[in-house]
Image (cartoon, grey):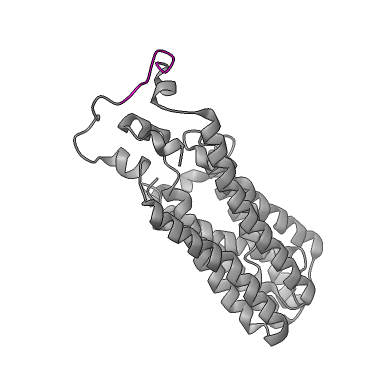
Amino acid sequence: MHPAPSIILFTVLSGLGLGLIIWMGLGLGPDSATFAWVSSIAALGISGIGGMLSALHLGKPSNASRSFSQWRSSWLSREACLLVTTLAVFDLYAAIWCLAGTRLFPLGLIAAALAGATIYSTAMIYAQIRAVPRWSLTPTPYLLTNQSLIAVTGGTAQVWLALLALVCAAGCAVWWQSKASHVRRSSTGASIGSATGLGKIGKVRLFESPHTGSNYLLDEMAYQIARHRADQLRKIGFGAGFAMPILLACLAMSAGASWLLLALVSHVIGMIALRWLFFAEAQHVQAMFYGQDRVLHL
C-alpha cells in the first residue's frame, strides 16, 4: 500500500511516547526531579504530537472527533479513546511525581496498562484487515518495537540490560513477522484462480487489464517497490533500529549516558525505515485483479 508520511510518523512517535509511559509507569529509571520533568514532558509531548498527526491521514481532519464514537466495533475508535485516557491518567501520575517527588505506583501501573492496550489497538487496526495478508501478524512486533525505544530511561545497568534484551527481542519479532507472513501466504497458494474459483478448471490468467493507465486503486492498494530498494531499506532499518542502539547502549555503560540519546535517534531512524516498508510491501489482494499474483508470494 502507498506509505503515507502522516501515518508513519504517527505510529513511530506514538510508539515512542507510549513506550516511555509504560516504562515510567512501571517505575523504571532514576528518581531524580530532572528525569521526572524531562521524561514526563517528552512522553506526553511525543504521544500528543503523534496523536495529532494521525488526524492528517483522515479524508477530513475536522471530523476526527467522530472517531471516538464507534469504540464498540472499531479498533481505530478504541485506539483513539485509549490514547486520550492514557494521556489523562499519565498526566495525573506525572504531576504527582514531578510536584510531590513521589511515584504513585498503582496509578503508574494503570497508565502502563492503558498504554499497552493502546499499542495493541493500533496493531489490531492493521491485523484485522484480512485483505492484506502481511499484516496478519502485526500485534507482537508492535508491542515489542514500541517498548524497545526505552534508551532514554537509562540510569542503572539493570535498565540498560533490559533495553538490550528488548531491542534483541524486537528485532527477532520483526524478522519473525516477515518470515511467518511469507510462509503463510505461500502455504495458502492464493491466486487469481483461487479468488475466482476457476483454478480447479485450469490455469487462470489476466486477459486484459481493467484499466489502460494508472488509477487510485493501483497507486494506493498495489503500490510496488523494487526488491533491491526494499532490501536496502531493510538493512538500514535493522542496522539503525536494532544493531546500533545495542552498541550505543553498551558504550553508555562505560562512557556515559549521553550515548543513549544517540541510541534513541538511531532507533527512531531505523523504525521509520521499517515502518515505511511495513506499508510499502503490504499490498492488497485487490492487486490480483490487475495481474499481480506475486503480491501474495513476495
Q: Is residue 253 above or below residue 122?
A: below
Of residues 184 and 56, which is closer to you in this image?
184
The residue at the point 68 percent across, 81 percent down is 252
The residue at the point 32 percent across, 32 percent down is 291
State the quadrant of the C terminus.
top left
Q: For residue 220, what is the image quadrant?
A: top left
x and y percentages locating residue 122 in the rendered image: 56, 48
Task: Specify the principal SS of the magenta part.
Answer: loop
Question: Can residue 286 be seen from the camera position used here?
Answer: yes
Q: Is residue 293 above or below residue 201?
A: below
Question: Can residue 52 be seen from the camera position used here?
Answer: no
Of residues 124 and 188, which is closer to you in this image?
188
x and y percentages locating residue 203 in the rendered image: 37, 20
147 is within the stretch colored magenta: no
Residue at the far top in the pictured view: 201
What residue span does the magenta drawing correspond to? 198-205
203 is within the stretch colored magenta: yes
Q: Is residue 170 above or below residue 253?
A: above
Of residues 39 and 164, which is closer to you in this image?
164
Q: For residue 187, what is the image quadrant?
A: top right
x and y percentages locating residue 279 in the rendered image: 45, 49
The residue at the point 72 percent across, 85 percent down is 254
State the quadrant of the N terminus.
top left
